[in-house]
Amino acid sequence: MKRMLLLGDEAIAQGALDAGLSGVYAYPGTPSTEITEYIQRSKEAHERGVHSLWSANEKTAMEAALGMSYAGKRVMTCMKHVGLNVAADGFINAGITGANGGLLVVVADDPSMHSSQNEQDSRFYGKFALVPVLEPANQQECYLATQYGFDLSEKYGTPVMIRITTRLAHSRAGVELGEPRAENELTLPADKRQFVLLPSIARRNYQSLLGKQAAFEEESEQSPLNAYEDADNRSLGIIACGIGYNYLMENYPDGCPHPVLKIGQYPVPRTMVKRMLDNCERVLVLEEGAPMLEEQIRGLMDATYNISGRLDGVVPRAGELNPNIVAQALAMEIQPGMEKPQIVQPRPPELCKGCPHIDSYNALNEALSDLEPGRVFSDIGCYTLGALEPFNSINTCVDMGASITMAKGAADAGLFPAVAVIGDSTFTHSGMTGLLDAVIENTPITVMIVDNETTGMTGGQTSSARGKLEDICKGIGVPEDHIIVVEPLRKNHEQNIDVIKRELYHRGVSVIIERRECIQTAVVSIKLAKEAKAKKEENA
Amino acid sequence: MKRDIILAGVGGQGILTIATIIGLAAVERGLQLKQAEVHGMSQRGGDVQSHLRISDRQIHSDLIPEGRADLIISIEPMESLRYTSFLAPDGWLIANKKPFVNIPNYPDFELVWKQIEELPRSILIDADKLAREVATGRSMNIVILGASSPFLPFELSEFEHAIETIFSRKGEAVVTQNVAALRAGRAFAEERNLAMQ
Ligand SMILES: Cc1ncc(C[n+]2csc(CCOP(=O)(O)OP(=O)(O)O)c2C)c(N)n1
Ligand code: SF4
């Protein structure tokens, strides 16, 4: 059998390929990005013609995936947790249409917010959409969950969510591969109205989805991802979800003396949970994320059983789990090493040396220096680091696209000048529609698109905006003489300040495109060009 | 047998190359391995760490518990101290001497070095200098791996083999340089007559 050393993300990618995947649709987002990147690099995927190009955002990715499922093929869409907010409309309604070819929605959550603005738990979305959710605990389970998930999806004609978290997504371990299987043939749904969610059809589909819930729960009871491991010491029972199980077992290297219910598939297998509650004096719930299961078990009145977890503070309410937190919840002694010496200073991330955003912010700061601060609405990307020293340039970062729309709202409230700073990839992700709102009302805002010609923050993926920004802005209706392209370089500093100052006081929509390639991708392109040239010379 | 290793440094310094080499040696031996990496936000010149665990038994957690790391291997001196709470009572800390200063309040270098040298089991090595002497500055992380090698359950030849596998793509010269860097780091550690108790 073939063994590979894979990240959790990569194990999902390889698992999906081996399970007969025909396409992946995704927008980058830590910690989910490496799933799609693995498929993009895979020779086999390339030979098979598996779709893997990036989508403009998570909503377009979700819908394209639903389309491929409609056509009968196995498809996966991948995103970070907040991406599911963007894709939620498609996701929830895909629950109602159901799937034709196997449809996996892979969502990577980021508890402790290593690189995110919140730590929302996607399992709630799965419950909301009434679809099965798989939560693998290790890299091997990541690999297996894909084929298992596709089969579940096709058996019930439903989307299936796979939920992982940062530590599994970005941790490597040995994975045993199974036998690859063929892709599906193109087959359209038998009922040509199944995907037409007119109220009459939607009601019927919804009833059918509700009707499947008991079967989904039964699948959970039988699932290879769920297991009841009985033990003698029933003063305590432990329910461990996802990678919470690993941290538990880390603390019991010779086996856990208490009964353990390992959960990796939802809806919650109630019979298994009840067995634990009835057999143990107290039950500890370990969840990597929000206390979702804990809340469900406690119920509204929180009366019957003796339950501990995040809600009674035995486990901290926020943040990811780790072996020490779990040890403390088990009232075990832990002996940490020497405390971090006081001289150690925090080292926050920073813009790379030579990053174009540095010059953009230097010019913007100077252009705004005569005005009261607090008028720069920004967005998510490398340029968000402009919030920190030494720039202190921006005042907001909320969700992708919110810079333009928040600037508009503030301008409507009377703030003038109001500035939006947004990256090129973020602009095509969800800035364009907000710009249309501003154009329609001729709202006085200055939009600075910091165009480094890539999706920098997540590692330099191709940006959908590449080569299209001027045309998009023109097409949306920004007047041509207020679409200005500048090159953020130190030598252009004075002239760029003048441009910004002029547009700031324009009583309408202006777009300044600050265009210079990201240093990181530039270095890679130069290296590739050099290698190509060397090869050519060698051959000549 | 198990070794729990915290790799530390600053984003972009290349701690993952060290992890890859140790990982390859472990896989060749048929050992279990887990390696938690950092991607995304923390890569831009911020502090980065990786948890590398190898064992002949099943490894459950991707993260090392506090107080249990056998080794902290750091490419940067202050960064090595960020993770002391993870170090086991008999664990070793191996750190590069050259500070990477990209914050205004970086502490006094002498104080950082003193803190490291005062630990009961530590090696402070000027890996940049050694690397330049035997190879090029870029092999600095391999020098550090060499200095850590007495505390790892592998023969030096196993690391050399791994280096060959990883760097052969870049040509014979790069392999030779990195092997030299590895040996120089090892010699430095041995000169101080150090071995895991
Ligand atoms: C809804 C959503 N999807 C994905 C992400 C992850 N993400 C954060 S910034 C970013 C890319 C930004 O690229 P760009 O706007 O071009 O700015 P750059 O980083 O290149 O400066 C991505 C994909 C996110 N935070 N939210
Ligand atoms: S990755 Fe590119 S865009 Fe991001 S900080 Fe570095 S140079 Fe700037």
Image (cartoon, rainbow, N blue to C red):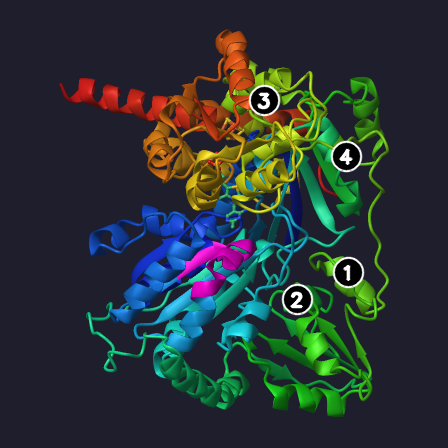
Q: Main secondary structure of the magenta part?
A: helix
Chain name for mark 4: B
Q: Label 2 belongs to which residue?
A: A244
Alpha carbon separation for disc pair 2 and 3: 42 Å
In terms of sequence position, does the residue under pointer 2 or pointer 1 come before the other?
2
Q: Is mark 2 within 8 Å of ligand 1?
A: no
| Spot occupied by residue A532 in the image (x, y as percentages of width and height) | 25, 24
Q: Label 4 belongs to which residue?
A: B81
The span shown in magenta is A77-90
Chain name for mark 2: A
| Spot occupied by residue A143 in the image (x, y as percentages of width and height) | 43, 65
Q: Residue furthest left?
A: A540
- Of A505 and A492, which appears nearest the observer? A505
Q: Using a 10 Å C-alpha cutoff, classify the residue at mark 1 as few (fewer than 14 neighbours), some (14 to 19) or many (20 or more).
A: many
In the rendered structure, does residue A30 fall within the stretch colored magenta? no
Same chain, labels 4 and 2? no
From the image, state whether disc 4 or disc 2 is nearer to you: 2
What mark, if any, has residue A361 been given in the picture? 3
Alpha carbon separation for disc pair 4 and 3: 34 Å
Is B7 situated left or right of A438 in this image?
A: right
Q: Secondary structure at mark 3?
A: helix
Alpha carbon separation for disc pair 2 and 1: 10 Å
Q: Label 1 belongs to which residue?
A: A325
